Image (cartoon, coloured by chain):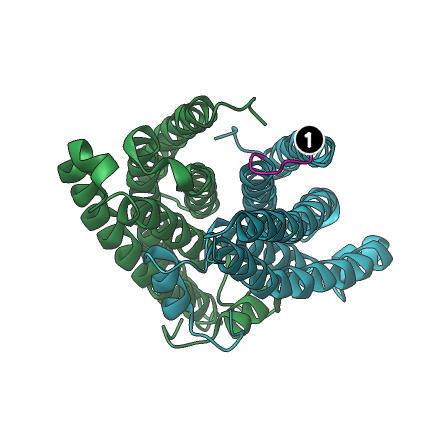
Chain colours: A green, B cyan
């Protein structure tokens, strides 16, 4: 993604049958949106008299969510680049046996590289859900539903990133690397889901409402 | 949102302490991204020999996901407009008793109106998760992880929209309207979660992989 691409153009390109953007890019963008929501709640907490006691924590959350937002947005483009490299490898000639072997090796190298952006997005999405849980506990009570949205959307970003790791790992010949990535993805998914539930329960409790 | 706003500008504005965009706009955009992912899988299914048997269903899913994508994107802007109307009502003068009463009435009218975009986004997100489940069952096997992402992200969009309904309903004096909206939100959330799980199980089964 060109970062200056319009929102509607990006969404339309995602829905098209063009090879990019795909699910990995969408997962990273969804993660960036979650980071931004948690950041917004933290910004509505900093500098308010009623929240003086948690000012240093809220300040730290502003900084960390901003970093995660910027890094996740960069991963949208990184995912598209990596995916294009996989497509290019699949288009290599396969007439002779030597060509077939070279193509197969190029595909495996590209697939391994293409697993890195979703793995990175997964780690960052987990950080975002953690920060959303943190700001749900201490943040400005008037924007708590946004903290719950941040946790919900961040969890979906983590699972979507993990699904892209899974899709890539399924094509890898290196069984050990695939198993390692999958085990990392599975653990991060479980942790994100649990942190999301914790954030939601916190928001329902602080808002004094029944859970959805 | 101006639909021509860049992706990075939208995400940055979401993270800022500017009053809009907020969680409702984010929920609608996340829903549009989910619709686009399901649409993409359907487009990769249409016109392929191996999927001739499901061509009419895939065609119908292309059309319905495209409609949902466009409608959800329009709700991003609608949510921002409705939120600005609520803010404007809160800024009305409250010096005299008559002013206080007029302001309170204006706030209630604006809050009721502001509940409509997230309610609409919730209904559309539920449609998107349903279509993601449908395309997960019949869609092109090479892009199944994208169908799973569509269901995951669509479910998060539904829950985020519901959280915005909840936040609005909590401020309504009309207890009956609030209870009605909440009950609708709760039912749609439960259905979205169940459809998401169905889509994920279908994708894991068709990919022949263990679930995440």
Q: Pinpoint residue B183: horizontal percent, then vertical percent.
A: 71, 29
Q: Is residue A110 left or right of residue B23?
A: left
Please say if A131 is above or below A204: below
Please say if B186 is above or below A81: above
Q: Is residue B1 rendered magenta in the image?
A: no
Which residue lies at the image location 57% right of the left edge and 64% below the top edge?
A: B81
Q: Is residue A169 left or right of residue B35?
A: left
Front residue of B78 and B194: B78
Could you say which quadrant of the image residue B74 lies in? bottom right
Can residue A79 be seen here? Answer: no
- Judging from the image, mark 1 belongs to the subunit labelled B
Front residue of A153 and B178: B178
Q: Which residue is mark 1?
A: B175
Q: Pinpoint residue B197: horizontal percent, then vertical percent.
A: 62, 31
Q: Is residue B171 rendered magenta in the image?
A: yes
Which residue lies at the image location 43% right of the left edge and 76% below the top edge?
A: A5
Could you say which quadrant of the image residue B129 lies in? top right
Front residue of A175 and B187: B187
**Magenta span:** B170-174
């Amino acid at each position: 993604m060109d970062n200056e691409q319009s929102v509607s153009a990006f969404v339309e390109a995602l829905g098209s049958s063009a090879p990019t953007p795909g699910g990995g890019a969408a997962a990273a963008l969804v993660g960036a949106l979650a980071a931004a929501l948690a950041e917004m709640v933290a910004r509505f907490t900093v500098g308010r008299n009623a929240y003086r006691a948690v000012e240093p924590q809220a300040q730290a959350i502003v900084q960390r969510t901003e970093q995660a937002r910027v890094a996740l947005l960069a991963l949208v483009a990184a995912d598209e680049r990596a995916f294009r490299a996989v497509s290019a490898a699949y288009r290599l000639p396969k007439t002779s046996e030597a060509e077939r072997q070279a193509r197969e090796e190029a595909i495996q190298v590209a697939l391994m590289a293409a697993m890195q952006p979703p793995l990175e997005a997964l780690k960052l999405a987990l950080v975002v859900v953690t920060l959303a849980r943190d700001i749900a506990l201490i943040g400005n009570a008037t924007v708590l539903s946004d903290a719950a949205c941040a946790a919900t959307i961040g969890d979906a970003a983590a699972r979507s990133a993990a699904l892209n790791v899974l899709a890539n790992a399924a094509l890898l010949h290196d069984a050990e690397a695939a198993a390692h990535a999958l085990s990392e993805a599975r653990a991060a998914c479980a942790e994100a889901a649990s942190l999301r539930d914790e954030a939601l329960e916190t928001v329902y409790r602080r808002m004094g409402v029944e859970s959805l």
